[in-house]
Image (tube, helix red, strand yellow):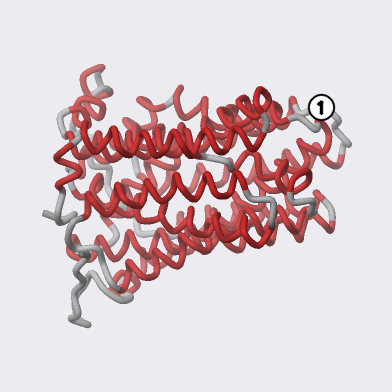
């Protein structure tokens, strides 16, 4: 059973993290950035499928976002540990605003090939490659250590709330025209950049260490030396890589569930509804016991929900499965983020977060490519169902490969 605490003054509960002004700025930026990313993804997905009618083309969008994560993983982590993480995050959000503005330009110029969209996706992916590790490593410095789990829950809740509103808003704005949705995304990214820049400057934590190949690879060595961390981030990688169906939602919306951009927005919002609700519960009733077992159970539910969604031909039923999928994924995300940041020294957080961001990118963007490529071979339904079955196999295998993670009790031990 999962135990919870009841002391209202416990810094892990309620809105304790919001007592700190810099955390409020951080969450504001995270919410706006998430809103923009989701609206942008809806716009790009519908635009690319509209001009290509190709699952392969949708998969290439995800691949274009992921490859920069892989290319810059070692550099971005070193940068995050050597320079002001606040400035790096703000610069990344400003670059994403430029990418969204570029997509707007493609619409205005009536581009009929997805090639420029791939280039802009790569630019956005490059910004995220540097912004994600810097942002993740910045969070622990914004609140006291005892408040950190509460900050993770609220930060995740803000992100998931944005992913509820973002896709639905993106679908509605796309109905007004693709220029509207891309213009909105560019503006939201820009405001997020300003909000991040307003955070009190934090000194670089790794400036005293001379850069070398040894320091660059330190994050990878650290993760390999910590079975619980390695197991947590690799579990997320393979489970979501196989079970991700996000890239195929435009196909499900148009061809299987027979709906329009508004329906695509609902489908993209459903996982976030489940995730945001779960994050809100975790903020008030934190996970304190049996964390490892709870995470593995959640990953199993993620796989079952993926299979259910893949077989569904009803919009309400599909929304229900996607909501369950998002709720179970949020439990896994909460455990992984808290465990990784808590078990990592501050001077190493940028490099560890960079490696973690590659795993996240692989599970999301590369997962979209995998889903698109497999759908081109066996169809969208077969791709989603096979992916869900693969997630179940991964959950069982990882419980045996990483017994320390399975037995992990308290996250902040």
Locate the C terminus by quadrant.
bottom left
Residue under the image location 44 percent in, 44 percent down: 303
Relative height, residue 334 to residue 44 (above, below): below
Relative height, residue 178 to residue 234 (above, below): below
x and y percentages locating residue 180 in the rendered image:
79, 55
Residue under the image location 31 percent in, 74 percent down: 284
Q: How many numbered marks does the figure carry?
A: 1
x and y percentages locating residue 183 in the rendered image:
74, 52
Q: Nearer the viewer, residue 399 or 311?
A: 311
Residue under the image location 19 percent in, 69 percent down: 3
Relative height, residue 33 to residue 373 (above, below): below
x and y percentages locating residue 139 in the rendered image:
32, 54
Q: Which residue is mark 1?
A: 113
Relative height, residue 325 to residue 385 (above, below): below
Locate the N terminus by quadrant.
bottom left
State which quadrant residue 96 falls in. top right
| Residue positioned most to the top | 213
Considering the numbered disc 1 on the image, is that residue within a helix, a strand or a loop?
Answer: loop
State which quadrant residue 46 falls in. top right
Q: Nearer the viewer, residue 51 or 92?
A: 51
């Amino acid at each position: 059973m999962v135990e919870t605490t009841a002391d209202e003054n416990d810094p892990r509960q309620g809105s304790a993290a919001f007592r700190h002004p810099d955390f409020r700025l951080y969450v504001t930026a995270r919410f706006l950035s998430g809103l923009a990313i989701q609206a942008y993804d809806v716009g790009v997905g519908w635009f690319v499928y509209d001009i290509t009618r190709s699952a392969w083309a949708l998969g290439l969008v995800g691949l274009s976002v992921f490859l920069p994560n892989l290319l810059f993983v070692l550099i971005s982590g070193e940068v995050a540990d050597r320079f002001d993480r606040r400035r790096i995050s703000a610069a990344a959000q400003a670059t994403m605003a430029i990418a969204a503005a570029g997509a707007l330009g493609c619409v205005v110029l009536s581009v009929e090939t997805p090639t420029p969209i791939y280039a802009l996706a790569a630019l956005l992916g490059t910004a995220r490659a540097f912004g994600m590790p810097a942002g993740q490593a910045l969070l622990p410095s914004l609140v006291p250590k005892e408040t950190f789990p509460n900050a993770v829950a609220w930060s995740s809740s803000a992100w998931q709330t944005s992913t509820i509103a973002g896709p639905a808003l993106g679908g509605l704005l796309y109905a007004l025209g693709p220029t509207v949705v891309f213009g909105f995304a560019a503006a939201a990214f820009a405001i997020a950049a300003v909000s991040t820049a307003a955070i009190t400057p934090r000194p670089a934590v790794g400036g005293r260490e001379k850069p070398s190949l040894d320091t660059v690879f330190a994050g990878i060595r650290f993760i390999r030396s910590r079975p619980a961390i390695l197991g947590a981030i690799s579990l997320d990688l393979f489970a979501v890589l196989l079970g991700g169906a996000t890239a195929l939602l435009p196909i499900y919306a148009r061809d299987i569930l027979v709906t329009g951009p508004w329906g695509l927005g609902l489908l993209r919002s459903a996982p976030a509804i489940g995730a945001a609700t779960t994050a809100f519960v975790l903020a008030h009733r934190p996970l304190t016991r049996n964390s490892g077992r709870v995470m593995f159970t959640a990953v199993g539910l993620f796989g079952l929900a993926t299979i259910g969604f893949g077989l569904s031909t009803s919009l309400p039923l599909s929304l229900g499965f996607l909501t369950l999928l998002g709720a179970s994924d949020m439990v896994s995300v909460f455990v992984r983020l808290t465990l990784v940041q808590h078990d990592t020294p501050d001077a190493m957080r940028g490099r560890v977060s960079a490696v973690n961001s590659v795993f996240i990118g692989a599970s999301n963007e590369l997962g979209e490519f995998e889903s698109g490529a497999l759908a081109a071979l066996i169809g969208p339904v077969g791709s989603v169902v096979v992916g869900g079955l693969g997630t179940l196999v991964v959950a069982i295998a990882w419980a045996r490969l990483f017994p320390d993670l399975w037995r992990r009790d308290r996250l902040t031990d």
